Amino acid sequence: MPGQPGGGFMQLLIMLGLMFVIFYFFLVRPQQRKQKEHEQMIKSLRKGDRVVTNSGIHGFIEGIRDDGTIMLKVAEGVKIQFSKNSVAYVKKKEGEVDQDKEAGKEK
């Protein structure tokens, strides 16, 4: 009935609950999934992997230390020490064919 007090309050609670559910499924869950994938990628790093850091530096992993750092070879005779967490993604795993070079050969 239109004259009942509190009817608008219940609708407000339902709308806020619905907004929370939408917020959770579109923002929180994808971020958690992405974080888990990144952690798994960090755990699977191996010597020889071609990686790209968050700062955009490309290189090959020369060594992995127990303190959570990696030695990255960026050029002949140039090695830089990074935190494992600074690796954005693995461009090529050791032993895999580089798809960028293969695509260039086919043209």
Image: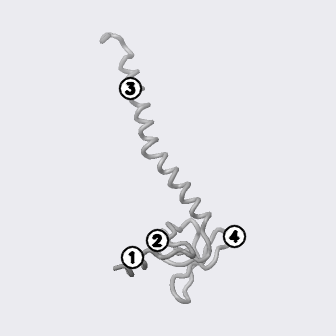
Q: Which residue is mark 1?
A: 103
At which x and y percent is residue 29?
A: 49, 46
- Point out the tag, 3 or 2, that comes first from the N-terminus: 3
Q: Quadrant of the C terminus?
A: bottom left
Q: Earlier in the sequence, mark 1 or mark 2?
A: 2
Name the element at disc 2. Answer: loop
Q: Earlier in the sequence, mark 1 or mark 4?
A: 4
Q: Amino acid at mark 3?
A: Leu
Mark 1 in CB contact with mark 4 (< 8 angstroms): no
Check disc 3 and report the residue beneath it: 12
Q: Amino acid at mark 4?
A: Asp
Instruction: Identify the residue shown where x is 55% and y is 82%.
Output: 73
What is the three-letter code of the residue carrying label 1?
A: Ala
Residue type for callout 2: Ser
Quarter of the figure with residue 102: bottom left
Q: Work out whether residue 3 or residue 43 is closer to the camera in this orientation and state it.
A: 43
Q: Viewed as shown, does residue 7 lie left or right of 70?
A: left
Q: Residue at x 44, y 74 (%)?
A: 99
Q: Nearer the viewer, residue 30 or 48?
A: 48
Considering only vertical position in the picture, is 91 above or below 74? above
Query: How far apart are labels 3 and 1 at the CA level?
Result: 56 Å
Say if mark 3 contacts mark 1, CB within 8 Å.
no
In space, the residues marked 1 and 2 are separated at their CA atoms by 26 Å
